[in-house]
Amino acid sequence: MENKFLPICKQDIIDRGWDQLDFVLVTGDSYVDHHSFGTAIISRVLENAGYKVGIIAQPNWKSTDDFMKLGRPRLGFLVNSGNMDSMVNHYSVSKKQRDKDLYSPGGKMGCRPDRAVIVYCNKIREAYKDVPVIIGGIEASLRRFAHYDYWANKVRKSILVDSGADLLVYGMSEKQIVEVADALNNGFDPKYIRHINGTCYMVDNLDEVYEDYVLLPSYKEICEDKKKYAQSFKMQYDEQDPYRGKVIVEPYGDKFLVQNKPEKPLNREELDDVYALPYQKTYHPIYKEMGGIPAIEEVKFSIVSSRGCFGSCSFCAITFHQGRAVQSRSHESIVDEAKYITTLPDFKGYIHDVGGPTANFRQEACKKQITKGACKHRQCLHPDPCKNLKVDHTDFIDLLRKVRSLPGIKKVFVRSGIRYDYVMADQDNKFLRELIKHHVSGQLKVAPEHVASEVLEHMQKPAGNTYDRFRQKFFAINEQLGMKQYLIPYLMSSHPGSTLNSAIELAEYLRDTNYQPEQVQDFYPTPGTLSTTMFYTGLDPLTMKEVYVPKTKQEKAMQRALLQYRAPRNYDLVHAALEEADREDLIGYGPKCLIKPREGRGYGYRSNSNNKNTKGNNNQRGNSSRNSKNSKNDKNNKNTRNKKSQGSRNSKNSTNRKKKR
């Protein structure tokens, strides 16, 4: 039995000799039985706990037929949207529908509805009025509180309220889903399963909450007052720790949402057990004639080494979903998986990745985290590495050596990204040297995201010249080893805090380092992140200070274009941006200019270093050190930025811009 996929039809249930399933799991993804897919993990964990589980993947939500095809489950329905939030899966940051869905057969779009969790729950209730319904996965986890919804441009209620589900399981969920299953199996009414960490439920009055709790502003208050919204997010943010976190309560009129504190992370043995379950490691055979499931190609020859991240980037949902405590699998578990991969018929000798949210995090940030949790008001790496941070790559080096020495393996790559500031905090170059020599595929991807200090501050990313120093060290070691490899930096435009001058500063840095990114990611305000709260409220909830937020279509397009200023298609946008920011000194023929003047216009003189308007603006940002912070001219640019880009532009400039448009 252990070598079979879980049931997807009545005949599968009959073949197993079962009369009824305990749980039916409804998902917005196709059924892929691989541990990189949440549906596979949760269903296999429940199976391992002795429960009978069936899968309804991508049901037709226009009727109840698909939701009834496996019959009524004995204990309940489990619902998720898939590996991605369904709105992120469907729409780009510009709110245009995507061309492909990598989690659907042949990449076909339209196989799941918008807001899939809510739609599926409604259909289940239509089919079976009183069956228990438990929601989970990324869509439910990140929408567990009232949240700003970018696509509707409004604050929506908790998904538990809108879906009408009985219980919400948040986070990675292996522990709590079994506890929930056991409670249901023991006869608990789902509405009264209130003792399990990592879950959310609804109550009629506060007397039903038996632990000390943090009371958030009400849904009505945060809809009416953005300052209240920011304060609410800060309160949630502070309590997302399994050791020191408190119960959180959010009022909805005469009802109350209750979030129990997060479940404790799995230890190494528990994590190994999860990854040792009998996954088929591929998609269900029914999809073969439809072109397969494209998403499997990204993970088929990759190994998940860890989960959780103490990097805490503001725009990343990992802090809210997986938590700041890093958990890692044992060497034995990973080596066993690598050996299995070598037996696959289409394996060519290359392990595509050994990593996780951050590949070079394989241990807790410090000893304190093990018993007391992560610090409430201190980040591990921002603005500088904490003095208590354990910086040690020894375990990861040993692991990579073991995997690459296995018979049949030619090369082991690390592609899931490393934290270069953590590398730079390591006094030993051993890891970086080993990485460059053995585990880079010609290009190493890292994520500086930006270079302007005001943007990096709001991103909670390393500022100063940390990336520059890493870049120099990377190329120096390559030269020592007689290798020629490249860095591919991920860059983001239009993040809260980024003005036109910030984008221009990044463009100048790209000019000085002679790098033109092929892809640039616009900031995407997804549910549950610190950055999304800044985007919606214009406030940094950690400080309650105002943050400049680029929101107009024109300015976002200009910021994006500046990062690819050499592309002819971006000329008009770059030209408009430089004019609006009073940076025509960068339009000309000099070595520091970003673009040439339009025909018939003579901005070329602006590149003359003797011109008073350009004195210092074309400063040499050397590759070894960027001292713009200390230059008088950068202070002048900062003044211009504050005047021009943060809402205090004068009416004359505003009128001129309207005429240009």
Image (cartoon, grey):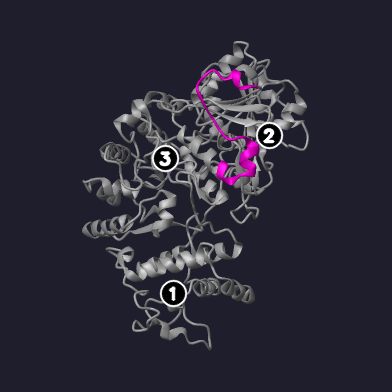
Q: Which residue is mark 2?
A: 162
The one of 156 and 319 positioned closer to us in this rendering? 156
How many numbered tags mark residues here? 3
Amino acid type, mark 1: Leu
- Look at the picture and state if 534 lies above or below 156: below
Left or right side of 112 for 244: left
Residue 489 seen anywhere in this rendered image of the structure: no
Is 365 on the left or on the right of 61, as rendered? left
Q: Which one is nearer the viewer's eye here, 288 or 39?
A: 39
The spot of residue 204 in percent (x, y) is: 66, 22
Give the Cα distance between marks 1 and 2. Answer: 50 Å
Decide which of 236, 276 is in the foreground and name it: 236
Identity of the amino acid at label 3? Answer: Gly
| Residue at (54, 17) in percent of width and height | 210
- Residue 299 at x, y percent in the picture: 48, 42
The answer to whether mark 1 and mark 2 are in CB contact below 8 A is no
Choose top left, top right, bottom left or bottom right for residue 266: top left
For mark 3, give the secondary structure.
Answer: loop
Mark 3 = which residue? 356
Label 1 crowd (10 A; few <14 / some 14-19 / many >=20): many
Determine if residue 43 is in view. Answer: yes
Neighbour class for label 3 at 10 Å: few (<14), some, many (≥20)? many
Q: Quadrant of residue 400?
A: top left
Q: Earlier in the sequence, mark 3 or mark 1?
A: 3
Q: Is residue 629 above or below residue 416?
A: below
Left or right, 34 with respect to 96, comes to: left
Which residue position is annotated with label 1?
A: 594
